[in-house]
Image (cartoon, rainbow, N blue to C red):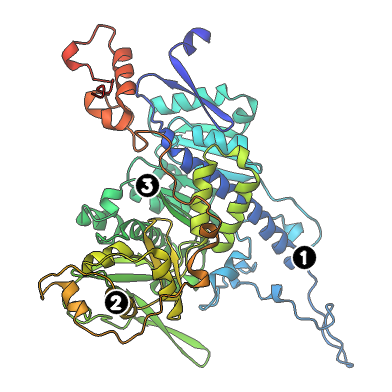
Amino acid sequence: MAAELGDYKVVKEGEAEILMHAKNEVFYNKTQINNRDLSIAVLRTFISQRKLEHEALISRKAKPLPKEPDENGAGSVSDGQHDESDERPAELEEQPKSEAPEEQSNRDVEEGCTGCDVAPEAVNGKGRKELKPTRVLEALSASGLRSLRYAREVDGVGQVVALDNDKASVEACRRNIKFNGSVASSKVESHLSDARMYMLTHPREFDVVDLDPYGSPSIFLDSAVQSVVDGGMLMCTATDLAVLCGGNGEVCYSKYGSYPLRGKYCHEMALRILLACIESHANRYKRYIVPVLSVQMDFYIRVFVRIYTSAGAMKNTPLKVSYVFQCTGCDSFHLQPVGRTVSKNNSTRYLPGFGPVVPQDCTDCGKKFCMGGPIWSAPIHDQEWVASILSDVKSMKDRYPAYDRISAVLTTVSEELPDIPLFLSLHNLCSTLKCTSPSAVIFRSAVINAGYRISGSHVNPLGLKTDAPMNVIWDIMRYWVKNHAVKSQPADQPGSVILAREPTLQANFARAVASLSKAQAKKVARFLPNPERHWGPKLRAGRQITGKHVSLLGPDAVNGLLKHGNNEEEPDSKKLKTQEPSSP
């Protein structure tokens, strides 16, 4: 074994250790430590929440039925007291043909543990059975580092199934399982299999399914939403941000069924495109999603959604997705919901949304609109979950190697307005008008003093999420430029057209109490720099490392790998310059 280990390097992350060969045979990216730490934090919260839902479900179903009132009008066992817990969703009942009410909220569904394994005697109140340990499927495991960390660091995980269709990766994963001792060997199992086929042949078997592919997850979504138990969680990563952010809109449409727009909010739009795509796949099987956390970090996006089954609640999907109209001249954008509801008496009808929400030309600058989407326009976070995850991370900071980064992201997410899709960029607004930019505090104060809400965005440190309409935003900027210099521009430019109109709102730039968030007031770091150089995507496993990959791996790493791969001396002309030129 010692002789075999000579060709490997031990990589330690958290409580797990893996053996990495010097050659690029199995994919590993140190940058993804943020992804793995955040996933562990969410998984811990999910297991805790699952236990609470299990206890609530058992207590409700074990409760005796109310007695028939007697002649004296005697009430039930609860002495006539009304218990709100009896008003549970219809899909949580034991009758298989029942459906949830059409207007049932997502929160009501989350309060029931629909995916819990409960013994019949526990349901009838005759006994009590503990909740089965959580089963996790990592569909694309590579070295198995994520699976090993789940097994070793998260209490309540009973089994982790690690899949890969690459033989070298499966061998590496099994080697790492053995290297991590008895705990890992008893919980983690590795299989050589196509993830799509495995998930299709194991429907509703896993409490958590983790998708972290190299590139787009689109081909795995249909089988993944079928493999999660009712009430389980799907964790999904997408690293093809060039596609999702509008670099190749036609490719994004072919993969995700949505057309992206190239605005400052493109990374948040990428999150919402992915959520809408997952929802679309889930709807085909009478299922729907409830996002608990959606983040953009480093070079990828990561979403955590719970999946439920309800033909009734699924009808609300058109109310949660919208098209986006983006002006080509200024920063104005508007959302067009796909569907709407009409209630009459006690019935609800689902109808197409009214439109268009914008005229042919922009009312602010007169330019045309581009249309993108559809995107998920409902909340992308559950603030209660975010608060719970952040509290857990802070209480166990020593167990998260990337604590600083994930706590900063979660802090920023916790301060976002949850019901406001996309955001504005203050610098873009000023660029359109060719004026000096007000400070974020001054602009926030003006919006708050006008009677609207405003917050930052975890995606962009300059992003501002607000429920103020665009005409109010431009009126505030018109008042701002009255006392600040403006660079002249042709009369037909969007900025000139906007400033040619007199404001109808009198802006108040007095400092507002809520202009700074709690984290800003306490000077908590929210946007941290990369911890080291070349912090980003890495080369796909199996590709030969050459000098052209220096921008991804760094000159020292590339030279070391080239030297290890070539026993003979490399010509001087092909060697990379690893030393910085000396300053004069």
Q: Earlier in the sequence, mark 1 or mark 2?
A: 1
- Which residue is under mark 2? 474
How dense is the environment of label 1, judged by Cα within 10 Å: few (below 14), some, or many (20 and up)? some
What whole-number distance in Å separates the C-alpha atoms at marks 2 and 3?
33 Å
What amino acid is found at the position of numbered circle 3 in the picture?
Tyr
What amino acid is found at the position of numbered circle 1 in the picture?
Ala
Q: Are marks 1 and 2 in contact (CB under 8 Å)?
A: no
Pinpoint residue 440: horizontal percent, then vertical percent. 40, 64
140 relative position to 253: left or right: right
Q: Dot 2 lies on which element? A: helix
- Which residue is under mark 1? 62
Tell me the number on the disc at residue 300: 3
Query: In this view of the protein, which residue sits in the foreground, 116 or 505?
Result: 505
How dense is the environment of label 2, judged by Cα within 10 Å: few (below 14), some, or many (20 and up)? many
Pinpoint residue 115: horizontal percent, then vertical percent. 60, 57
Which of labels 1 and 3 is toward the front? 3
Q: Are marks 1 and 3 in contact (CB under 8 Å)?
A: no
512 relative position to 576: left or right: right
Q: Dot 1 lies on which element? A: loop
Above or below: residue 365 compared with residue 576? below
Query: In this view of the protein, which residue sits in the foreground, 512 or 422?
Result: 512
Pinpoint residue 219: horizontal percent, then vertical percent. 34, 48
Q: Quadrant of residue 572?
A: top left
How dense is the environment of label 3, judged by Cα within 10 Å: few (below 14), some, or many (20 and up)? many
Query: In this view of the protein, which residue sits in the foreground, 77 or 234?
Result: 234
